[in-house]
Image (cartoon, helix red, strand yellow):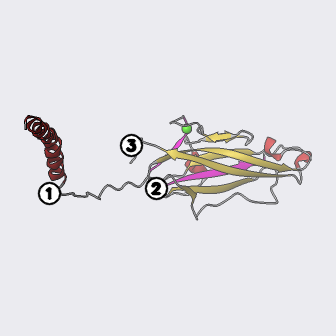
Amino acid sequence: MKRRGIVILVIGLGLAALAGPVAIAFGAQRGQAAFGDSETFGLNRVTSASVSIEVGANTVPIETATMAPGDRLFGEITFENQGSLPLRYSLAADTVTTGSVSLLDVLRWKIWPSLAGGTCSPSSAAGRMLFDGVMNQANVLGDPAIGDDPGDRLVAVGRTDVLCMEVELPIGVSDEYQAVGATVELIALAEHATETLD
Ligand SMILES: [Ca+2]
């Protein structure tokens, strides 16, 4: 009888030891089943801006096959800001010549901004010349380096920049410049500008 009483006591201690862990596990399950809710705010939308410069339809190129000494030809080029940011651009030239001598060595080019709503007459160039010289340099207006450089042209969104052009074959040019050709490709390099514009 005395030995049996000892056995019962050992079993009772075992149950007491299990009671703690069982109670803790039951409590955690009740927490996961708590009431919940969620809400979505889906109105965060971002579209990046654009820089877009285009040549306008009313551009008039300089083109002739019969230029004689003393002749002056006029052209007009319109650059349009079709992007969503103000832009500034520089102007570079890519040139090609044909013949035994370079016609570009003697042609005199002038570029000036058109008067608002005006035409590209020589009188509109007075005091407003942007370029006057031979077209044998890469940079014609401004500087393609990033940033606001002297000569860079600013154009507001939806606005245009109209440049007038003149090319002259000087009256005293020598006979060797007969029947030779030159092609000048003007390249506008634009970047967005943060300056305040009208
Ligand atoms: Ca620049």
**Of 10 and 83, the residue lying toward us:** 10
Q: Position of residue 192 (x, y in %)?
A: 48, 45
Q: Amino acid at mark 1?
A: Phe
Which residue lies under the disc numbered 1? 35
Which-is-in-front pick, marks 2 and 1? 1
- Disc 1 or 3, which lies upstream in sequence? 1
User: Would residue 198 appear left or right of 126 to someone viewing this image?
Assistant: left
Q: Which residues are magenta?
A: 150-169
Mark linked to residue 89: none
Quarter where residue 1 is shown: top left
Observer-nearest of 171 and 139: 139
Which numbered disc covers residue 196? 3
Residue drawn at x 80%, y 41% as measured from the top left: 105
Q: Is residue 106 visible?
A: no
Which residue lies under the disc numbered 2?
159
Where residue 148 appears, as percent x and y from the top left, is 50, 36
Say if disc 3 is inside 8 Å of ligand 1: no
Dot 1, crowdedness within 10 Å: few (<14), some or many (≥20)? few
Residue positioned 21% across, 57% down in the render: 38
